[in-house]
Image (cartoon, rainbow, N blue to C red):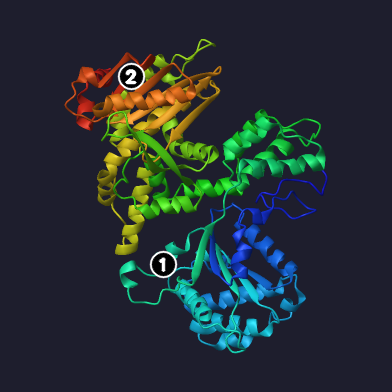
Amino acid sequence: MSQQHKSFNITGVCVPDEHYMLPVLDRLPCAIDLIENKRHFVLHAPRQSGKSTFLQFLTGKINAYGKYYCVSSSLSTLENIVDINMAMDIIFDEITLGLECSAVPVLNGLANQNNELLKVFPSSRIRRLLMKLSNQLDKDVVLLFDEIDSLAGPALSTFLTQLREGYLHRSNSSSSRFPRSIALIGLRDISEYRDKIYPEEQSLGLAIPFDIITESFSLPNFSLDDIAYLYSQHTVATGQNFEKNAIDRAWYWSEGQPWLANALAYEAVENQLKNNFSIPVTESEIDTAAHAIMLSNREHIRSIRHRLQEYRVIRTMEAVIIGSQTVPDGITQDDFRYSEDLGLLKNVKITLEDDTQVNAMKIIDGLKPSNPIYKNIIFKMLTDILQSNIPIAFIRPWTDGHVLDMNGLLRSFQTFWRLHSGMLTSGDISTKSIELAIRHGMEHYERTHAKPADLDLAESIKSSMVFFFNEALSHLVILSFLQRLLNGGVDNIEREVALGSGRLDICVYYKKISYPIELKINGVSSFDSSLKQLLRYMDHLKASEGWLVIFDNDANVPWEGKIRDSTVDFLGKTIHVFFCWFFSVAQWANEPMIRRAQET
């Protein structure tokens, strides 16, 4: 690849004559209108979705237009700064740096002309700087602040209050000019900054510094057409074509996430095809690229893995995996919003049976992983520990080279569950979430008590959450079991999950045959509903045979009924039903099979 067209830009928005370019303002066409109308606004979107590149492009666009001046500044260095005076000094310095780095000479000349304002009170320092800067220029100025999320508490309140006061008292007189428009760019919507300043009950009667924000927008992901346009520029530059199936597959894996859309093309062109532009990029190269990205150590992927070490994030992910129909105890709506803001989850519409009407459906709001690549990374993080604890005795060929023995595989899982579920659910092999919960509780205890946490605290944390974790654990165990036993031997294992769905759908693909599996918790009370849900999934996959695995914790079920399976004909389809009951530790220890194993 030539130096001029060396690689895809990882933000999805590129500089002309250096990289491939997607029209930036097409993703947020209202930005110029807001500036024309003297509006302050917020732009929020997950990391690596092109916010910072949008800011840079918009700055250059406004300055090139010539009607206004534009200065952009990053507030990333303010993270963890709680001292108001220090925070205002840093913001002052970042604005100055934005002037120094501007491509407009007149802005460069103002960079260090206002340092005397560093001596004024921090509560008015930024407002005075912006008023003076506006008065020094012959045209209106537009300010763009990136990484607004770095500010919190009193520092954020002081900064926004100064923007509010300057906005409310601005005029064309020389004494009170103020920037024409200010944009705040970050991860979260402006309404969520309020909680970072003070609790809602403390805000009553106070001047809220958010009411000057007239609009709040999220930068959208790429559409399928956007990805096709982006890739077409590579074709024009090099002659290398992306087949339509390859473009569709890039959309499937990324769902328009800008960094992923670019990274898939980069991986396919440079690493899979070694820059041989005579070979078209096919669906196969994109699939290989997706798996390489999931296993890679790139900064973006490392960041996702790091976020999955956070207690609140992993709890929300487990709730999504088990399809919780209500928000589990200990998780707040803000925890879900936080994972959405990070770009890990997205809102979806879920179709469910309407229990209030016969043969009626209802549509509810739910959450699911943002794209298949993130979903696979999440599942891998959650199941790695469990996979390593599956005995090698269960690993054997589960195919004759033509079809999978799914019934034999699930009966083998029942044996594994019968032998090990008591140990698993008692916490001897803890899930990542239990481990993190204990660590989280200990850290909180140490902060609040200033002395080491003890094991009693750890045990109380674990016991208070054990039911929820048992629910998630059953899903994670069977996923780990399937992945461990089928690793490398099947075409793919797809997992469809969503908060609110009440289930987890799995499809194992082998030799172009689909093997749909649905997992349910406490599903016996709605057996017909479970069958209908699986039937819709089978219809979607055009499969005539499906598997329903039901986990339940009814202690009254006799031992001979806890582990069993049956086959039913349901509306012309064959469905195999496998029951796997939870065991209490006492039940598990007294189970005849366990006692025989212990005796031998």
Does the residue at mark 2 contact the one at mark 1 (Cβ under 8 Å)?
A: no
* Image side of residue 404 versus residue 353, left or right: right
Please tell me which residue lies in front, 79 or 157.
Answer: 157
Q: Judging from the image, what secondary structure is the residue with disc 1 in? A: helix
Relative placement, left or right, of 523 versus 436 is left
Residue closer to the observer: 585 or 291: 291
Query: Which one is nearer the viewer's eye here, 472 or 590?
Result: 472
- Label total for image: 2
What secondary structure is found at the residue carrying circle 2?
A: strand
* On-image quarter of the C terminus: top left
Q: Is residue 243 above or below residue 176?
A: above
Q: From the viewer's perspective, tell me whether residue 536 is left or right of residue 244.
A: left
- For residue 295, say whether it is visible: no
Q: Which residue is mark 1?
A: 194
> What x and y, as percent, mark residue 462?
29, 45
Q: Position of residue 217 (x, y in %)?
A: 53, 59
Tag 1: amino acid: Arg
User: What is the three-letter code of the residue carrying label 2?
Assistant: Val
| Residue 24: assigned label | none
Quadrant in the picture for residue 573: top left
Q: Quadrant of the N terminus?
A: top right
Label 2, label 1: how far apart the Cα atoms are: 50 Å
Of pointers 2 and 1, the one earlier in the residue sequence:
1
| Circle 2 crowding by C-alpha within 10 Å: few under 14, some 14–19, many from 20 | many
Q: Eyeballing the image, is 498 above or below 200?
A: above
Q: Which residue is mark 2?
A: 577
Find residue 366 and report its image quarter: top left
Q: Position of residue 160 (x, y in %)?
A: 49, 74
**Viewer-side residue, 8 vs 27:** 27
